[in-house]
Image: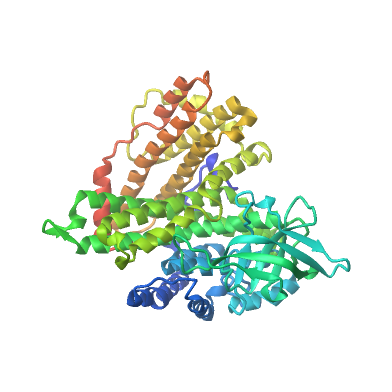
Amino acid sequence: MLKGGEFLVKNTEPESIFIPEEWTEEQLMIRDMVKDFCDQEILQPMRESGKELNASTDKDKIVELLHKSAELGLCGLSIPEEYGGMDLDFNTGLLFGEAISTGFSFATTIGAHTSIGSLPIVYYGTEDQKAKYLPKIATAEYKASYALTEPGAGSDANSGKTKAIPSEDGTHYILNGQKMWITNGGFADIFIVFAKIEDDKNLSAFIVEKNFGGITLGEEERKLGIKGSSTVQVFFTDCKVPSENLLAKRGDGFKIALNILNSGRIKLSSGSIGGGKFALTQAIIYANERKQFKKSISEFGAIKHKIGEMATQLFAAESAIYRTGKYIDEKESIAAQAGATKSESKVIGLREYAVECAILKVYCSEVLDYCVDETLQIFGGMGYSAEAGIEMGYRDARITRIYEGTNEINRMLSFGELMKRAFQEKEIDLISAGKKIPTSFVSQLFSSKYHPGEERKIIDNMKRLFIAVSGIAGKKLGMKMIDEQEIVMSLADVLAEVYVTESLFLRVEKLRKQSHESSKMIIVEQILQLHIYESLGRIRIALGHAVDSLPDGSKQKLQRKMIRRFARRYTVNPKELRRNIANYFIAESGYTF
């Protein structure tokens, strides 16, 4: 199987990946149960009252929803069965994230509880810690939260000032500091708190119970969106934390935070796609019902453009998400067979695909923002009004580009982690791949267009372009490249296009070899063609920005020619493809894949 980031230098066979069409009946039952829960417990009451949940006034209702979720087993998704959880595989957990997104801000609440609030204990806790806390988290007797961010430590999390001083007798730590933007903080029973022990360079992590004392909560934050998610500041003043509540080893907190964030990033990706699908379906229903000029607005080309574009982006993004989720499961299994404990195996799986998790966080959150924005546009004035509920989804979606690491940070992380694995850890052989590029360039000098059927060739050339321009930038800038964030972010966008486009292509290839209804396969093929057409355009722009931003004397003329040649025109009609895709989903009255 591929190592993380290795998709760039090795081709993948379609048979080796997971595609959403392969969900089992049991997995789909879990998805449908979650969607039904969201509809009955959140959406219907919201429609009846005309009000969204608000953590300032509806805290009891939010806690009640957590308890009802726990009764269905949803609060213990990733908790081992021996501690009362469901112990779902990672990919099924991603499917849960997609389904729970229809609960709007409650998705953030339960997401924090089941992911960043409890996984540090699942992955790094001692047996005593797991036995003490996990059963109560699974039943929501304990509500969990994650306290990392501080007023002066956001993206630079390791610069946090919260301190933990060991007591003279070694029985406990005295915790002092301030945390902010703490999801579930207003009602949490336990906090996973990151603090530096004395003057340590790196953070340590602690399980802190609210009833330890010395904890004060700020007022609920007044936010743009996710108003039904509790977000507060948490102050620790001489909070006594038993020594046995240190997670893992002293100084391991930063490592714990990074690995938990890898999990959070890809889970946010699946939630983003779930929200995007929900938005698209609402847009189609409204467009079919809304009449203007004596016909449904879904019949107009401008609306078809929006619907076809949303559907294409969602289909491509989900192809990459569940491909990656299965990779994580497979890596976990391999690590376990090699002798790693269950907890160690889970961490190894996540760590392996840190590049892909960062890529997907950025890509999928921006797909979601595109979908909710276009949905509001299709609704027009009704979308801008609170009555339709669309503006709530618009506001809720905006946070996805900020939390779990801003998209800017994740762009630089995906590129930086890839380069580290290539040139420091020597795990990805970019050098050998780069040496083959001149021959490939010469062989295609007289090719003027791409045609349908050449998708594999196109994707290979996308990879060559990324490797070539990254190498040129690296040689020209050297160590200064770390400060050229604009160039790095452009290259990261190309890296994301490569991974998502290849994932979509592999899904379509696998479907081609299976028996599927012809009408659906025609649309799948057209989604692939439209995505490649648009992806090539985005790559031309991003690489053009990168090359033009290099210092003078970098042979930009030759590089621009290389970009034009490897990212040349793809001979399809994007308008017709987009209309055909839109017509399919309009007839289905929503996203039905």
> How many circles with numbers are drawn on the protein?
0
Query: Extreme left residue here?
Result: 294
Residue 140 location, quadrant = bottom right
Q: Residue at x 70, y 69 (%)?
A: 208
Q: Residue at x 12, y 56 (%)?
A: 293
Q: Is residue 46 left or right of residue 333?
A: left
Query: Extreme right residue here?
Result: 169
Q: Residue at x 38, y 74 (%)?
A: 39
Q: How is the image coloured?
A: rainbow
Q: Nearer the viewer, residue 446 or 589?
A: 589
The answer to whether residue 47 is above or below residue 267 is: below
List x then y, in percent, for residue 215. Answer: 68, 70
Q: Residue at x 68, y 51 (%)?
A: 158
List x then y, in percent, for residue 7. Answer: 53, 44
List x then y, in percent, for residue 257. Answer: 65, 57
Residue 333 shows up from this direction? no
Q: Nearer the viewer, residue 86 or 432?
A: 86
Q: Is residue 494 left or right of residue 159?
A: left
List x then y, in percent, for residue 275. Answer: 41, 61
Residue 203 shows up from this direction? yes
- Where is the C terminus found, in terms of image quarters? bottom left
